[in-house]
Image (cartoon, helix red, strand yellow):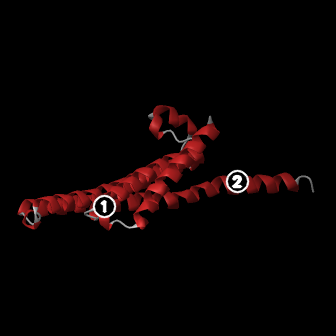
């Protein structure tokens, strides 16, 4: 009976070690989503430049058209930030579950992901930037401060809450 026990443990360990390669699904999905979001951001940017080049925005009025252009470019920026977050997530999952720890020395410090906590912290930081862009875009979409509703205040409160949680993560790891 004792000879069979280590064999079961060894088999279970092998299954667990090989199951880490199922993370390839998350990596592949993130990479496909990254390409999609980069494409979407590029198309949105080209649309804005095209509208400005043919003069559609100028006919609406100078101030209003510049706000519309800024909001549309912020939407494209939003797409690019989401793409970068997905790309970083794919890299993080790869480096944590599939990549070799010895290779991390050869990469720049911002690509060295050595724990799930490190990956979560960086993704939370990206989320703060995304929410800030969404908040600015929302403010610009409302032309005057008088038309703002209380709903828009949820975003800065969320930004502060996430920033505080990032700070807590940093203090825990120090």
List x then y, in percent, for residue 132: 39, 53
Where the C terminus falls, by quadrant? Answer: top right
List x then y, in percent, for residue 71: 25, 60
Residue 80: which numbered mark, if any? none
Residue located at (8% from left, 59% from top): 53
- Residue 94 visible in image: no
102 in relation to 78, above or below: above
Residue located at (16% from left, 58% from top): 66
Asked if residue 85 lies left or right of residue 78, the reply is right
List x then y, in percent, for residue 102: 55, 35
Foreground pick, 157 / 48: 157
170 in relation to 142, above or below: above
Q: Examine the image and state in which quarter residue 57 appears.
A: bottom left
Going by the picture, which residue comes out furthest to the front?
146
Asked if residue 99 lies left or right of residue 55, the reply is right
Asked if residue 169 lies left or right of residue 7, the reply is left
Q: Nearer the viewer, mark 2 or mark 1?
A: 1
Residue count near mark 1 (Cα–Cα under 10 Å), binned few <14, some 14–19, many ≥20: few
Mark 1 or mark 2, which is nearer the start of the sequence? 2
Foreground pick, 158 / 56: 158
Residue located at (69% from left, 57% from top): 15
The kind of secondary structure element at disc 1 is: helix
List x then y, in percent, for residue 113: 53, 42
The kind of secondary structure element at disc 2 is: helix
- Residue 74 visible in image: yes
Residue 14: which numbered mark, if any? 2
Q: Examine the image and state in which quarter residue 82 appears.
A: bottom left
Residue assigned mark 1: 145
């Amino acid at each position: 009976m004792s000879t069979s026990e280590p064999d079961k443990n060894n088999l279970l360990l092998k299954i667990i070690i090989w199951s880490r390669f199922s993370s390839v699904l998350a990596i592949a999905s993130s990479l496909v989503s990254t390409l999609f979001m980069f494409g979407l951001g590029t198309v949105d940017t080209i649309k804005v430049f095209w509208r400005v080049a043919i003069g559609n925005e100028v006919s609406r009025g100078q101030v209003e058209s510049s706000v519309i252009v800024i909001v549309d470019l912020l939407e494209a920026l939003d797409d690019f930030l989401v793409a970068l977050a997905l790309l970083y997530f794919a890299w993080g999952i790869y480096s944590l579950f599939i990549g070799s720890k010895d290779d991390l020395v050869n990469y720049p410090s911002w690509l060295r992901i050595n724990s799930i906590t490190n990956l979560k912290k960086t993704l939370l930081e990206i989320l703060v930037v995304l929410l800030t862009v969404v908040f600015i875009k929302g403010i610009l979409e409302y032309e005057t401060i008088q038309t703002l509703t209380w709903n828009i205040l949820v975003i800065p409160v969320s930004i502060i809450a996430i920033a505080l949680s990032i700070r807590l993560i940093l203090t825990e790891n120090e």
